[in-house]
Each structure stands twice: as structure tokens, then as C-alpha cells.
Image (tube, grey):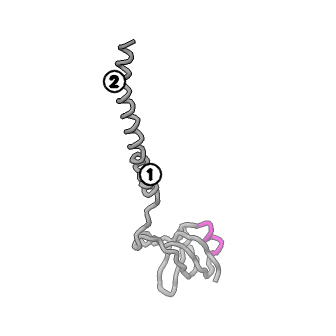
């Protein structure tokens, strides 16, 4: 019995100290967890493209004509021919003057077509 009392008298202060430390450290861990969740949210947001790389929707005018086995937009005013990525939509306007709305891939000369309207 005396051994148990001696053990309890030695263990109780250690347990009390451990409990006190747990309560004292809890706000630090909570703050750290909150900071981590904010960092994770920040990291998950998509990166905004640079202004130079941002794709701009533009309107192009011209006539849909056949060039080989492809349909293209021929802009007579600036003597430019553009490839069209949506051949099925362009087919409806073959040999017509149109306004094409889309994004130009300057490296390939291809318009990613959003809409085609007759003029």
C-alpha cells in the first residue's frame, strides 16, 4: 500500500504538469492548424495567367472558303487567311461573309471558334 501511495505521490505532479502543458500548447496548435488551412486554400487557387499570355476573344470578319480539304476564314481587307478549329460550324457558312468570334492561336494561325454569324 505504501508503494502505491509513494508511486501516486510521484506520478500525480507529473500528470498535473502534463495536463497543464497540454492546455497551454493547445492555442499554439490551433493557430498553426488555422495557418496551414489558409496556406492550403491559397495554394489551391488557380494561378492567373500573365497579361501577355491571356487569351483575348476577338472578332474576325471575312468569307468562309474551302482551302484544300479544310474550311478557312479569308479576310480580304488585311489579306489574311485563318484556320478554323470548328469545321462543322464553318460548313454551315461556306462561301458566305461572316463574323467569327474566338481566340486566335498566333503560332498556328488557327481561330478557336466561339461563334460564327452571317454579316
Identify which residue is drawn at 38% across, 16% down.
4
- Indicate whether residue 88 is drawn in magenta: yes
Instruction: Point out the tag, 2 or 1, that comes first from the N-terminus.
Output: 2
Compare residues 10 and 103 and report the one nearer the observer: 10
**Disc ID at residue 34:** 1
- Residue at mark 2 to residue at mark 1: CA–CA distance: 37 Å
- Indicate whether residue 103 is drawn in magenta: no
Q: Measured from the top left, where is residue 32 in percent x and y?
A: 40, 49
Kindly identify which residue carries mark 2: 10
Q: Residues within 10 Å of mark 1 (few under 14, many from 20)?
A: few
Q: Residues within 10 Å of mark 2 (few under 14, many from 20)?
A: few
Q: Measured from the top left, where is residue 77 in percent x and y?
A: 50, 87
Question: Where are the magenta residues, as a range?
Answer: 87-93
Mark 1 lies on a secondary structure that is helix
Check the image and report above or below for 104 versus 10: below
Check the image and report above or below for 54 versus 9: below
Identify which residue is drawn at 44% across, 58% down.
42
Amino acid at each position: 500500500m505504501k508503494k502505491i501511495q509513494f508511486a501516486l505521490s510521484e506520478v500525480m505532479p507529473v500528470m498535473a504538469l502534463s495536463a497543464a502543458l497540454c492546455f497551454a500548447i493547445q492555442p499554439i496548435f490551433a493557430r498553426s492548424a488555422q495557418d496551414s488551412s489558409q496556406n492550403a486554400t491559397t495554394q489551391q487557387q488557380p494561378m492567373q495567367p500573365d497579361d501577355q499570355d491571356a487569351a483575348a476573344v476577338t472578332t474576325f470578319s471575312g468569307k468562309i472558303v474551302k482551302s484544300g480539304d479544310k474550311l478557312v476564314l479569308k479576310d480580304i481587307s488585311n489579306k489574311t487567311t485563318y484556320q478554323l478549329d470548328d469545321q462543322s460550324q464553318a460548313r454551315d457558312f461556306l462561301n458566305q461573309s461572316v463574323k467569327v468570334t474566338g481566340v486566335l492561336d498566333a503560332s498556328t494561325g488557327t481561330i478557336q471558334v466561339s461563334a460564327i454569324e452571317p454579316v
